[in-house]
Amino acid sequence: MDPTLILTLILGLFGFLLVLGIPIFAALGVPSILGIYLVSGANALNVIPSILHRGIASYSLLCIPLFILMGEVLARTSIGTRLYNLFYTWLNHVRCSLAIASVGASAIFGAMSGVSVAGAATIGRVAIPEMLKRQYDPGLAGGSVAAAGSLALLIPPSVGFVLYGEMANQSIGKLFTAAIVPGLVLSLLMMLYLYGLSHLKPAVAPLEQQRVSWSERWRTLRDVWAAILLILAVLGTIYLGIATPTEASGIGAAGAFLVAMGYRELNREKLFEIVRSTIVTSSMILLIVAAALLFGYVIIRLQIPQMLIAWVAQLSQPGWVILLLILIFLLIIGMFLDIVSIILITTPILLPIVTSLGLDPIWFGVVLIIMCEMAVITPPVGLNLYVIKGIAPQISLRDITLGALPFVLVEALAVLILVLFPQLALWLPSRM
């Protein structure tokens, strides 16, 4: 059969199964198995076990359940509250300080968890009631926390970078390092947006009347020393070459338990919840990875990357036009797929095009993750929007969505900055 026809059948069946509500791993896996059959016949199905074994039995993938375990432990401690209090007390005199504090706390919490949903839920439970109590606009309160929670996808350690590194055959340590400066830049852009909005529309974020003493500010710094130490233990060991990302994930998971025990916030019930959530989330991700491996095998056998590169060459368009089309494509599919599926499905298709344009795979990994950040705050499948609705039922989903959508433009600005100044992502990895 014609390769284009086979690909059309696979993608069409994938979309149909998604509409039926079939889980992602099955909706992707079944068409991929069909694709293997159509490409090479029934005997070729014997290669499926070896494909899955080569892909799943990967040392790098071990860090996925360990990073998820770290995030699950920390999400059940008071570390999120402590981080939020730190930023609020130090920014108390600044207009929109509560929302800005949510961004700062989410950024640091993301450096310890790597899971967007955990960041949005943990910080949101503390920040949103405080903002509503002080007459903040409900949309701003919910939307700012939903967007800030997405920073966990970009700021390392991030499960998204582990998946991309595995699919793109890139160093996970370098991907983590490449995201540090862009993560700080995006956090700052979010804060500047909130600060500017509060001055253009003072009614959405009334000026804080309560004053905080310097003794309280110094106390909040002492409260988060464990968080800072944990971040340094995970990222510092990777950057200095002391540990691989997989080994660092073990350090992070063990450190998270030590933090929880130090705060005396770990009991049997929480431990059961932690283990259960870690198993469920890790299994879901690894099942999608398995399905994506089969999909990638079909893509390679059909020589789709080579066909796409030849098609792009025939377009005779500047590189920036091709890149813009790729970004628009990622934005559109991000409205309908979860971030794991976006990374695993698009990487084997888009990466050959990106490298043919002379762009760095490490740089593209950072850009791809920022596009995934947009996916978690854009309807109809913006997961963080529903998380905020769940913890703040008094805010309508419409208000949360309208409050979060301006942050898509903020993230688009961050992508533009990376396009204009790629060394923001590439300088630190080059020094490793």
Image (cartoon, helix red, strand yellow):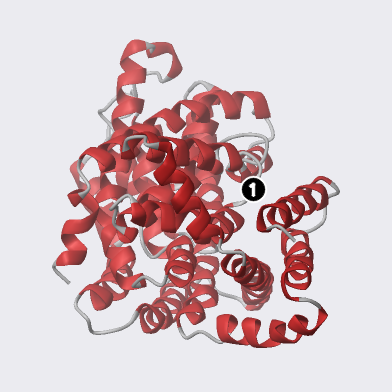
Left or right placement of residue 378 versus residue 136 in this view: right
At which x and y percent is residue 3?
Answer: 67, 58
Q: Residue furthest right?
A: 20
Residues 197 and 54: in front is 54
Location of the N terminus by quadrant is bottom right
Decide: is 369 above or below 401: below
Vertical position of residue 162 compared to residue 105: above or below = below
Residue 95 shows in the view:
yes
On screen, residue 19 versus residue 148, left or right, reads right
Towards the viewer: 419 or 374: 419
**Residue 149 makes an appearance in the image:** no
Residue on which disc 1 sits:
337
> Relative to 197, does residue 390 appear above or below in the rendering?
below
| Residue 169 relative to residue 33: left or right | left
Asked which secondary structure carries label 1, the reply is loop
**Horizontal relation, residue 386 to residue 246: left or right:** right
- The outermost residue toward the left is 431
State the residue at coordinates (69%, 85%): 47
Q: Quadrant of the C terminus?
A: bottom left
Q: Position of residue 194 (x, y in %)?
A: 36, 27
Using the image as rendered, state which of residue 125 and residue 9 is in the foreground. 9
- Viewer-closest of 161 and 278: 161
> How many numbered circles does the render carry?
1
Give amino acid for label 1. Answer: Leu
Density class for disc 1 (Cα within 10 Å; few <14, some 14-19, many ≥20) is many
Q: Position of residue 205 (x, y in %)?
A: 41, 20
Q: Residue at x 40, y 76 (%)?
A: 252
Q: Residue at x 45, y 51 (%)?
A: 310
Q: Position of residue 70 (x, y in %)?
A: 48, 71
